[in-house]
Amino acid sequence: MKSFGTSKSFLFTKDKEWETVGEGVKRKIMGYDDKIMLVHVSFSKGGIGPMHQHHHSQVTHVASGVFDVTIDGETQRLSIGDNFYIPTNVLHGAICIEAGELIDVFSPIREDFME
């Protein structure tokens, strides 16, 4: 695996640029090393995180907004303070019902986000 090194010890949202990753969806990669990655994702109302799967484990915190999250065929409505876990290679996606932000943690890091 390619080594990505370590990001800074102190990470300030204001110092990171938003990257548009879909209609109504943008992200900031906040911190990472070879084993773990933190990503801040912002959704406009109606924004979609399309159904997909990857070999990374993922834990996500709903920082604000309301989302319909589907994991392995089951959909739940989540709001501020809720969390969800996605095991490796499980199909998942999200639809933003009320504009909001998610905090994603991946292990290992999403190499595809670094390109």
Image: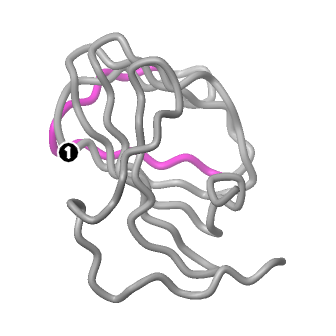
In which image quadrant can residue 51 be found? Answer: top right
Above or below, 84 relative to 10: above
Identify the amino acid type marked 1. Ala
Give the side of residue 82 with respect to residue 1, left or right.
left
Q: Is residue 77 one of those drawn in magenta?
A: yes
Q: Quadrant of the C terminus?
A: bottom right
For image coordinates 39% across by 17% down, the residue present is 47
Q: How many marks?
A: 1
Q: Please give left or right for residue 97 compared with residue 74 in the image.
A: left
Q: Residue at x 20, y 60 (%)?
A: 14
Dominant SS of magenta comes to strand
Residue 38 lies in the magenta stretch: no
Front in this rendered view, residue 103 or 3: 3
Q: Nearer the viewer, residue 10 or 108?
A: 10
Q: Secondary structure at mark 1?
A: strand
In the image, taking residue 25 as reference, residue 92 lies left or right, namely right
Residue to which mark 1 is pinned:
63
Along the horizontal axis of the image, is 22 left or right of 3?
left
Provide residue 65's location: percent of width, then percent of height.
18, 28
Q: Residue at (20%, 31%) from the top-left corner?
A: 79
Q: Quadrant of the N terminus?
A: bottom right
Instruction: State the image quarter where residue 91 is shown.
Output: top right
Q: Position of residue 49 (x, y in %)?
A: 51, 26
Location of residue 108 with respect to 115 vertically, above or below: below
Binning the other alpha carbons within 10 Å of mark 1 as few (below 14), some (14 to 19) or many (20 upward) gives some
Quarter where residue 59 is shown: bottom left
Q: Which residues are magenta?
A: 75-87
Q: Position of residue 23 (x, y in %)?
A: 47, 18
User: What's the coloring here?
Assistant: one colour
Name the residue: 34% across, 89% down. 9
